């Protein structure tokens, strides 16, 4: 789900430049805070369903001990304090790119701070986006499966049907993506609010079962456990990380609600509820070691099991929805930044720019999620695969944050290095603990991430080689204009817009039109669409116009990497600004290339074939740029790469 970005309109600004009344500002702030519950905290909020159970599962061979429970709960609590609260909520949310967060936003900010595109910064951004794809596939699978496994406690008779029910719920979830989430979004926040209140109360009621569980607030309990249990402690730490897997969502979705509502909601509402629940689960296991089988659902009395399963299932669907939509957003950013081929992106809301649907990615996610569920079958088995990709993403985010702190915030190295290294050290420890699980299932997200990185690398390399070849074989636009002034081709009435990826060279479609049709329109626009290192470009800076001659005009449209490049909307802005441009009387000329492998290609044959396949699967320019198909003329050419 996507909501209006908080920075588009300050809750305290009534729109006339004056401060809003306190009551109005408070109401707007409360709405943003409630909305953040439904979008941002679903993933991290549903982690109590499986985090402690997965952590304590390592004790089953030798039996659960008091030191083990206290140490594990202490590690869970301090992971929430340090990684989520200190790193993400208080530190990283200050490293925003015009109000937007996330790995690709941080990459763009780091590149801007360095003043140029640096290879290692680019690779870090690509790695972060690729690793997120592994998280996007595993989160729906483990969340929904762990919730429905609670039905086994209601009645064992339903146990054989848990897997089919999970598959049905997941199919329904992905099938509903095309309809958008605007109609149900209003319920997300309140439902998650009820969920957090419920799990907080259930946990608080069980602390009395073993009051000594409060000793878990002492970080020495967790450190002592790690140091005293060797490899076992390290394995438990890898499972403890499951409690903070939703941290990236706090940062990535910052632009949709604003920093303050997210911070206040976390500190005042979500964090206390999670801590109470983990304390309650720990106390329950201390008083009844048999409860280790499913401590979350056993917090509820028997009569409350079914309602809790239903509530948890709805919460996991909401959590999955947020991750799926986040994947759509990352894909759109990747396409805009040139990391992936053009894809058809549908808008499911007429008013909210962020509500999008990417059919191809939706299908791939569904297939991946279903394969994971069928392969691993239980949430406990899936827990072994979960976390590896997320820890990698966190390491990438921290590394990019160092560049921002050093170059953008201008902190001295003597201060920036120890400050960021404290977070990086914890991230690396978590990464090491999760790498132990590679053989048990952690290879799955790493394989997914590696595949995505290869695809991105191939696409970037191939498009760069193609652009260089076209540039070598093309004529500079100013030279062409001078040549046409002398040759005087036949002119026909109307306006023709020729799209080109580079505004400096003559579009291939224009050259083919002159070669084969031997005519030119009265007015010719050479139009380029450029993506900036900004999330969104203000409407006032949407277009840039340069008159090349009496009848030739160069137009550059600027879009942010979180915007869809809808050309008709940009032309409408130009028309309002006084430029004559009626899209229904204008012809758009596009070049379409049939790419063939070159005998001496710089790329290996497998990469060449992959690039050609990706190019053929790219969305047609009229669909991607939202140009009416009846106004488009496509002229093809064959090129080798």
Image: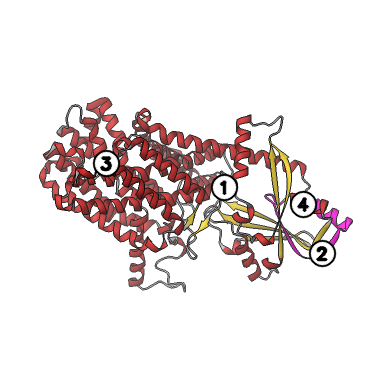
| Of the two numbered discs 3 and 1 in the rendering, the one whose residue sits closer to the viewer | 3
**Can residue 85 be seen from the camera position used here?**
no
Secondary structure category for the residue under label 1? loop
In the rendered structure, which disc, 3 or 2, sits on the residue that comes first in sequence?
3
Q: What residue do we see at 55% from left, 52% from top?
A: 344
Disc 1 designates what residue?
A: 337
Check contact, mark 3 vs mark 4: CB within 8 A: no
- On the rendered image, what quadrant is the N terminus found in? bottom left
Residue 547 in the image: x percent, y percent?
A: 75, 61
Q: Is residue 210 left or right of residue 10?
A: left
Q: Tell me the CA gap for discs 3 and 1.
A: 46 Å
In the rendered structure, which disc, 3 or 4, sits on the residue that comes first in sequence?
3
Depicted 6 relative to depicted 297: above or below: below
Disc 2 designates what residue?
A: 492
Q: Tell me the CA gap for discs 3 and 2.
A: 72 Å
Q: Which mark is residue 160?
A: 3
Disc 4 designates what residue?
A: 477
Secondary structure category for the residue under label 4? helix
| Label 2 packing within 10 angstroms: few (<14), some (14-19), many (20+) | few
Q: Tell me the CA gap for discs 1 and 4.
A: 25 Å
Q: Is residue 488 magenta?
A: yes
Magenta region, residue range: 476-503
Q: Depth check: 383 or 9 in front?
A: 383
Residue 169 in the image: x percent, y percent?
A: 35, 50
């Amino acid at each position: 789900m996507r909501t209006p970005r908080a920075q588009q309109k300050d809750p305290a600004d009534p729109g006339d430049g004056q401060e809003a009344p306190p009551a109005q500002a408070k109401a707007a702030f409360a709405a943003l805070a409630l909305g953040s519950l439904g979008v941002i905290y679903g993933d991290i909020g549903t982690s109590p369903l499986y985090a402690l159970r997965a952590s304590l599962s390592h004790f089953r061979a030798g039996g659960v001990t008091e030191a083990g429970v206290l140490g594990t709960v202490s590690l869970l609590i301090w992971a929430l304090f340090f990684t989520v609260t200190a790193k993400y909520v208080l530190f990283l949310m200050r490293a925003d790119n015009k109000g937007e967060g996330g790995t690709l936003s941080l990459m763009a900010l780091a590149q801007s701070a360095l003043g140029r595109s640096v290879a290692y910064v680019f690779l870090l951004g690509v790695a972060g986006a690729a690793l997120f794809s592994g998280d996007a596939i595993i989160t729906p699978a483990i969340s929904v499966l762990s919730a429905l496994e609670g039905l086994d406690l209601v009645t064992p008779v339903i146990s054989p049907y848990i897997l089919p029910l999970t598959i049905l719920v997941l199919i329904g979830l992905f099938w509903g993506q095309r309809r958008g989430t605007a109609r149900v979004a209003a319920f997300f926040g309140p439902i998650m609010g009820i969920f957090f209140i419920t799990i907080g109360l259930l946990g608080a009621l069980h602390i009395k079962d073993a009051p000594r569980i409060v000793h878990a607030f002492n970080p020495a309990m967790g450190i002592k456990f790690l140091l005293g249990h060797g490899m076992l402690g390290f394995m438990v730490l890898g499972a403890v990380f499951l409690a903070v897997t939703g941290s990236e969502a706090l940062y990535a979705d910052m632009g949709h609600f604003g920093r303050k509502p997210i911070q206040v909601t976390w500190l005042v509402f979500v964090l206390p509820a999670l801590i109470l629940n983990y304390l309650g689960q720990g106390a329950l296991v201390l008083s009844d070691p048999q409860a280790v089988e499913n401590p979350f659902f056993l917090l509820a009395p028997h009569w409350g099991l079914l309602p809790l399963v239903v509530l948890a299932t709805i919460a996991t669907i909401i959590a999955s929805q947020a991750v799926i939509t986040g994947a759509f957003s990352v894909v759109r950013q990747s396409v805009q930044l040139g990391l992936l081929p053009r894809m058809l992106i549908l808008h499911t809301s007429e008013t909210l720019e962020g509500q999008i649907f990417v059919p191809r990615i939706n299908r791939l996610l569904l297939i991946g999620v279903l394969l994971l569920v069928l392969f691993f079958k239980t949430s406990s088995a899936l827990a072994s695969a979960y976390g590896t990709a997320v820890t990698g993403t966190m390491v990438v985010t921290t590394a990019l944050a160092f560049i921002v702190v050093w170059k953008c915030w201008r902190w001295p190295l003597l201060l920036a290095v120890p400050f960021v290294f404290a977070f990086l050290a914890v991230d690396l420890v978590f990464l090491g603990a999760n790498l132990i699980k590679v053989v048990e299932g952690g290879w799955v997200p790493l394989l997914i991430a590696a595949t995505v990185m290869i695809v991105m690398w191939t696409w970037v390399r191939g498009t760069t080689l193609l652009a260089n070849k076209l540039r070598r074989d093309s004529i500079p636009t100013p030279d062409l204009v001078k040549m046409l002034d002398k040759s005087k081709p036949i002119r026909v009435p109307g306006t023709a817009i020729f799209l080109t990826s580079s505004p400096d060279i003559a579009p291939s479609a224009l050259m083919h039109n002159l070669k084969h049709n031997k005519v030119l329109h009265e007015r010719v626009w050479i139009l380029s669409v450029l993506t900036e290192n900004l999330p969104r470009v203000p409407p006032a800076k949407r277009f840039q116009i340069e008159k090349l001659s009496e009848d030739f005009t160069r137009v550059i449209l600027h879009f942010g990497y979180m915007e869809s490049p809808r050309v008709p909307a940009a032309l409408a802005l130009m028309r309002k600004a006084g430029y004559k441009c009626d899209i229904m009387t204008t012809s758009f000329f596009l070049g379409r290339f049939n790419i063939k492998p070159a005998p001496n290609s710089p790329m290996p044959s497998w990469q060449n074939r992959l690039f050609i396949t990706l190019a053929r699967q790219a969305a047609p320019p009229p669909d991607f740029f939202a140009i009416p198909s009846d106004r488009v003329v496509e002229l093809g050419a064959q090129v080798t790469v």
